[in-house]
Image (cartoon, rainbow, N blue to C red):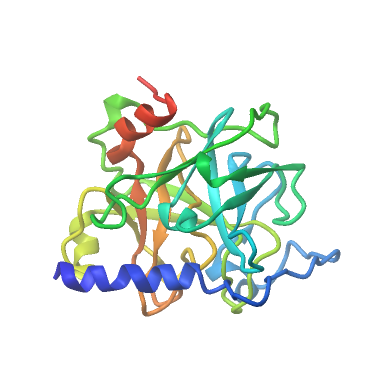
């Protein structure tokens, strides 16, 4: 059954990288007439547009290779004044990233920083071992405000907490139910499921992966990779957006995240960020 799961990961990565073209740069139109009361079928897999300041910890990542017009779009989470947590597959084979902070518009943050790949730290077990799709990006110092702020990690006392059936929110600028990418940040409230339940869809799921239920096709999608999954109560970062089923974002199949509690030691070792 694990072989079935392994086949899903490259397809999920293809989904995340579907925005890339070696000849074109994907630029989204800026809609000055954004309507916050859009019909459900026009927003990300039946989620909702975020109000300003809802997720001050999320950043938009525009990743590129030198000498190429290709562009990979991902999300990330601020976990400290100079650290962003994202998915390892977002940073793979990229030379630099433009990090956009502090706005719900993907292309129009309050400010941005360009960071070279020598500041990327991918998990050493990725991609050879499932459940390690996580990376750190060292950034210039960022001051915290009501629009730009960190999200807390789980404490070391919570490292065995599975968060099963907890409600959480995930946000991003990825694919919408109408097949278009989002200019305005979209969020969805979803419930964390057990790995045993998730295994019914994908085969054996290692502890480093956390899955969420996607009723009615409400889910993450391509371009959301690396973004946050944050608990509703006493908000903490429990997941990093990693994959969806090859059946599609709106198929109702579980969506997969890298489980943050499985990587607390690794995060502390490389960034010094830890909660006790």
Q: Position of residue 217 (x, y in %)?
A: 45, 72
Task: Tell me if residue 186 comes above or below residue 44 in the rendering.
Answer: above
Q: What is the x, y in percent for residue 200?
A: 19, 68
Give the residue displayed 16% in from the left and 62% down from the top. Answer: 204
Residue ranking furthest to the right: 32
Number of marks drawn: 0
Residue 193: give x, y in percent of width and height: 29, 55
- Vertical order, 232 against 197 (above or below): above
Of 253 and 232, which appears nearest the observer? 253
Give x and y (percent) for residue 35: 78, 65
Say which residue appears at 20% left-offset and 73% top-offset.
4
In the image, is 119 to the left or to the right of 103?
Answer: left
Horizontal arrangement in the rendering, residue 58 relative to residue 198 (left or right)? right
**In screen coordinates, is 43 left or right of 3?**
right
Q: Quadrant of the C terminus?
A: top left
- Furthest residue to the top? 276
Residue 253 visible here: no
The residue lying at 17 percent from left, 71 percent from top is 3
Between 48 and 134, the one nearer to me in the picture: 134
As rendered, which of 223 and 125 lies closer to the eye? 125
Quadrant location, the N terminus = bottom left
Q: Is residue 86 visible?
A: yes
**Among the 4 quarters of the image, the one containing residue 81:** top right
């Amino acid at each position: 059954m694990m072989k079935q799961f392994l086949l899903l990961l490259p397809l999920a990565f293809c989904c995340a990288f579907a925005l890339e073209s070696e000849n074109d740069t994907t630029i989204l139109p800026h809609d000055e007439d954004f309507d916050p009361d859009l019909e459900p079928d026009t927003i990300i897999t039946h989620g909702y547009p975020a109000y300003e300041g809802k997720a001050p910890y999320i950043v938009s990542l525009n990743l590129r290779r030198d000498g190429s017009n290709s562009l990979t779009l991902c999300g990330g989470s601020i976990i400290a004044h100079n650290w962003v947590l994202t998915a390892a597959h977002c940073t793979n084979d990229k030379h630099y990233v433009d990090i956009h902070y502090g706005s719900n518009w993907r292309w129009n943050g309050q400010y941005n920083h360009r960071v070279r790949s020598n500041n990327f730290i991918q998990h050493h077990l990725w991609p050879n071992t499932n459940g390690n799709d996580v990376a750190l990006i060292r950034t210039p110092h960022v001051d915290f405000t009501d629009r730009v702020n960190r999200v807390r990690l789980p404490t070391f006392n919570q490292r065995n907490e599975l968060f099963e059936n907890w409600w959480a929110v995930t946000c991003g600028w990825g694919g919408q139910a109408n097949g278009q990418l989002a200019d305005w940040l979209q969020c969805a409230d979803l419930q964390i499921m057990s790995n045993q339940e998730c295994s019914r869809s994908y085969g054996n799921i290692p502890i480093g992966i956390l899955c969420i239920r996607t009723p009615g096709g409400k889910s993450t999608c391509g371009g959301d990779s690396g973004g946050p999954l944050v608990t509703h109560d006493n908000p903490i970062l429990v997941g990093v957006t990693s994959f969806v089923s090859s059946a599609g974002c709106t198929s109702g199949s579980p969506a997969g995240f890298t489980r943050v509690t499985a990587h607390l030691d690794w995060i502390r070792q490389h960034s010094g960020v830890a909660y006790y």
